Image: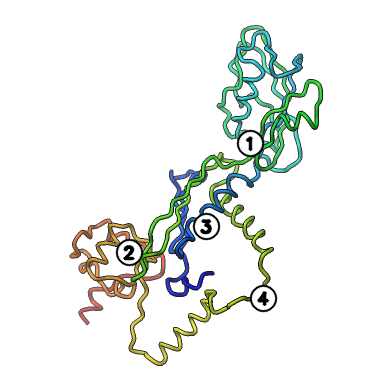
Amino acid sequence: MHIIQEEIGLPTFSVTPVKKGDDCHAIFTIAPLPPGYGMTLGNAMRRVLLSSLPGAAVTSIRVSGVQHEYTTIKGVHESIMDIALNLKLLRLRKHNKEQEVIKLEAKGPLAVTAKDLKSTSDIEVLNPELPLLTLEKGASIDMQLTIEKGVGYASAAERNKKQNEPGLIYVDAVFTPVVKVRFDVEAARVGQRTDLEKLILDIETNGSLTAEDAVQFGSQLLQSYFGYFASDKKVVEPEFMADFSRTTAQQTEDATHTPSKESYTPIEILNFSPRTLNALINAGVGSIEQLTKCTEATLSNFRGFGAKALDEVKKTLGDRGLKLSDENTLDS
């Protein structure tokens, strides 16, 4: 880890769901980071999340009485090409990577949706309300869908060249379960350092994988590749790599020689909301140690510091096993 982290402390990592109860869309924040690391980490994570996560998709279809995708079926409103495009929107969860074939058999009049698919116990349809085709009275359809698990994108044209089989219609397959990845890099401050960065990742998946699992997989994949560049047996310029055990030992030694020196932990690492943080800094409270010496009454007298800010401070301190000073303690 960058040697700057010894000065500013370890980055904190937080996950915030965009909607309560929805684990498929979340905001990930990591800060503080050294200058330039927001873009470095954000771009790497975005590329991996969009290209390398496993997912399931329809790769080919076979329709009774149909030889190619430009065919129309009597009594079916959509052409085979339109049906194939609808199938590309299917959101699927597949528990193993073996290829499987599922069926769709229906008779009109009927608006056929994804819930009419006869899937196996290994395959879950995550958007059963998705419209697939419309059958008129007396019309019917008998279709087989090949479901595969993979990564990235598989072109129907390429598969058709390699595995040309009469009556089998290949479909462009987008396997990635990630619907959206967006990252922003904002300025961060710790103490007197104002050149630090905060990375914010906005990630949404199709439901086959949670947003947190997507980040976990992407991080492990990057780590496995970067491992090829490094060796645990060799450390280059160790004095420029963050060693928090060394920092802890130095702090202990300093405390022994200068017991009267008060520790100073920047308040920014608590990740307060901007309004709360500004109110505390403007009032001269710049460290966690100073904050824990304040009482509720003291904080309430700060300009721009309301009840919500007080609740935020109490909760954040409580999460770290800390609390505000007691009125009675000050009086004594």
Image quadrant for the C terminus? bottom left
Q: Which label sits in the foreground, 1 or 3? A: 3
The residue identified by callout 2 is: 314
Q: Which label sits in the foreground, 1 or 4? A: 4
Q: Earlier in the sequence, mark 3 or mark 2?
A: 3
Query: In the image, which disc is placed on residue 174?
Result: 1
The residue identified by callout 3 is: 40
Image quadrant for the N terminus? bottom right
Q: Residues within 10 Å of mark 2 (few under 14, many from 20)?
A: some
Q: Residues under labels 3 and 2: Cα distance? A: 34 Å
Asked which quadrant contains residue 18, the reply is top left
Q: Residues under labels 2 and 4: Cα distance? A: 45 Å
The image shows residue 318 at horizontal and vertical percentages of 38, 66
Q: In this view, does 157 lie to the left or right of 216?
A: right
The residue identified by callout 4 is: 234
User: Secondary structure beneath disc 2?
Assistant: helix
Residue 166 drawn above or below residue 256 = above
Amino acid marked by disc 1: Val
